[in-house]
Amino acid sequence: MKKRTLLSVTFVAAAVLSLASLGAAAQDNKFKIGLIIPLTGPQSTTGIQIEAAARLYMAQHGDTVAGKKIELIVRDDAATPDVTKRIAQELVVKDKINVMAGFGVTPAALAAAPIATQSKTPLVVMAAATSSITQASPYIIRTSFTIPQAAVSMADWAPKNGIKKVVTLVSDYGPGFDAEKFFKDRLAFNGGEVVESMRVPLRNPDFAPFLQKVRETKPDALFVFVPSGAGAAVMKQFLERGLDKAGIKLIGTGDLTDDDQLNGMGDGALGVVTAHHYSAYHQSPTNKKFVTAFEKANKGMRPNFMAMGGYDGMRVIYEALRASKGQGGGDALLDAMKGQIFESPRGPMFIDAQTRDVVHNMYLRKVERKDGQLHNVEFDVIKDMKDPGKTK
Ligand code: PHB
């Protein structure tokens, strides 16, 4: 009797084992990308842009790489870090994803970072932009941009163009702190001065009292960072309060004049100067091809910098899979992401192997009307800029 029990236990164990290896075999022909993005809530446009770009990349490049069938698993975290964390855990444990990507805001990327480290799963940041994110896990790669890249570029341009006395207005969280600090320090270095630094809540911000204060302070310019999706509200209230008429210039990181919203901002946005890594109006054949294909596949949408982070992120994943031949797990995949260099629709792009962060051009742009649309028209460039926030 005892012997029989033992035998059947062995049999069951063997069956379970072979089932598991069968599962693994099926798994072997698949390559799963867990895309965690905000598709609801105030950051939803970020997720919508990223998903559209990721699907476009797949439509253009096929869904089989190195003999593996690529599966895109899209999950909405509403940019809420607790939800991001739960989804990341589920995707790693249950879905056995090979790579996670997306991350619409800094707190979401930081929430998923420990899961990437523990499970040795590469994490591609396609949107969030606080400098320190890449230091939260050795498995993080970034294809979006860093806020210090944009803030420093703006602070170099401003004093050369008559802007010495500036008030800063930023969203009260990671990227806002980066924008405030890097703009202020660099402006001071260049002989200008930030006379007042203001922070507005990320959720449901009311800009009115802050803008009233700016009017009274009467600086040469107001420098703004708000996340993608919030720029139109700032622009509207800036104009309604007549700050432009009072001779105060509006400048900022390019998140302010987001291509997703810019057309709706109206002529009041004309002349606003920002610094950023991507404009839908970037004049290169690679970008023209990208914008045309994106707009064809997504009626009524124009790609913004979030779409760009998603599109290039997919490129980095595809090419890493091709180079590692789908062998060697997360570590091999990560290694093949490091050091990638290519021509992106944004311009030349490089993933620094040491910092795992993006190195690319920063452009100074001015809002102009072109072909009946409002565009961020590039007029100057700082080539191959590393993240000024990295000390090593
Ligand atoms: C961020 O949370 O890191 C973030 C979000 C939206 C932006 C820029 C940065 O436009």
Image: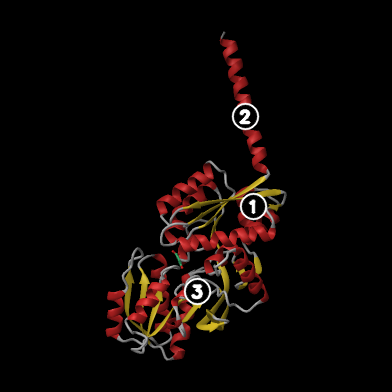
Q: CA distance from mark 1 to mark 3?
A: 29 Å
Residue extending farthest to the top is 1
Which numbered marker is on residue 59?
A: none
- Residue 64 x/y as whole percent: 70, 52
Viewed as shown, does residue 34 lie left or right of 292? left
- Residue beneath disc 3: 149
The residue positioned 67% from the left and 48% from the top of the image is: 69
Viewed as shown, does residue 277 lie left or right of 214? right
- Look at the image and tell me in which quarter the N terminus lies: top right
Viewed as shown, does residue 254 lie left or right of 73? left
In the foreground, 351 or 254: 254
- Residue beneath disc 1: 332
Give the number of the mark in front: 1 or 3: 3
Mark closer to the chain start, 3 or 2: 2
Rendered view: 56 above or below 277: above
Circles 2 and 1: CB distance less than 8 Å?
A: no
